[in-house]
Image (cartoon, rainbow, N blue to C red):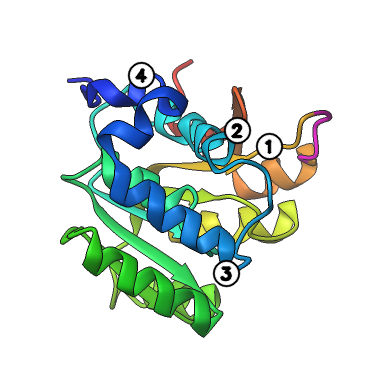
Amino acid sequence: MAKTLPAGWSSLRRDLMQQHPELLETLRQAQRFGFFGSRPIDEAVEHSRSFVDALSSASPPNRLVDLGSGGGLPGLVLADVFRTTTIVLTDRREKRTDFLSRAVSRLAYSHVSVVPGDVESLCRSVEARTSLAFDVVTARGFGPPEVTLRFARRLMTVDGSIVISEPPNGDRWDPALLNELGLAGEPRGRVRVFRASSHLPN
């Protein structure tokens, strides 16, 4: 059954201030701290809508991890929409994870946890089965394409998906890398969605 999104998310620019003022102020604070660029915050949030849209054509994910969560885009936006999903925000910079922890508490996101440290440690935990894998991995500005995709592949479930922010122009994904990782990608607006090739319909 498809996820029914809150009405305010049909146009984030118009409705965020009215329906999600605490989230908007949290993201503005993150911007003041220099956690992301100087463009208007409503435009930055609008970019996160691509992540929401990419995940809204199927049932809500059970577990989602956002790599390099920084100031909370798209992680906090996804957390606000997908209230029944267990969400992990991770970043290796302590200042940012401290901010995210306070934000999660202030916004009362009981379904969200913040994990400081390198993604490699999280990957090893998943591979050792001391942590569960994720059916969705998201990333916005985490790192070079190959690094991002390799980490994400190690964290996702067999039938999971990876959603990564795309540049305005060009295809930066090496077909040889996708073949090696057993992934196929599909552009969805400002993001690209990857799934295991073996789990795509013929």
Query: What number is the disc on residue 33?
Result: 3
Give the amino acid type for the residue marked by disc 4 in the picture.
Answer: Ser
Q: x%, y% of residue 68?
A: 55, 64
Of the residues tagged 1 and 2, which is closer to the observer? 1
- Residue drawn 42% across the image and 52% down it: 75
Query: Which residue is located at x 50 percent, y 84 percent?
Result: 94
Q: Amino acid at mark 1?
A: Glu
Q: Nearer the viewer, mark 4 or mark 1?
A: 4
State if disc 2 and disc 1 touch (CB < 8 Å): yes
Q: Foreground: 187 or 44?
A: 44
Measured from the top left, where is residue 12 in percent x and y?
A: 42, 28
Q: Which residue is mark 1?
A: 166
Q: CA distance from mark 1 to mark 3?
A: 24 Å
Element class at badge 2: strand
Q: Quadrant of residue 7?
A: top left
Kind of element beneath mark 3: loop
Q: Which is nearer the N-term, disc 3 or disc 2?
A: 3
Mark 1: which secondary structure? loop
Q: Residues within 10 Å of mark 4 (few under 14, many from 20)?
A: few
Check if residue 30 falls in the magenta segment.
no
For label 3, the crowd category at 10 Å Cα-Cα, with few meaning under 14, some 14 to 19 and many 20 or more, is: few
Q: In which quadrant is the N terminus drawn?
A: top left
Q: Which residue is mark 4?
A: 10
Query: Residue 11: horizontal and vertical position, in percent?
Result: 41, 20
Q: CA distance from mark 2 to mark 4?
A: 20 Å
Q: Amino acid at mark 3?
A: Phe
Q: Which residues are magenta?
A: 169-173
Residue assigned mark 2: 192
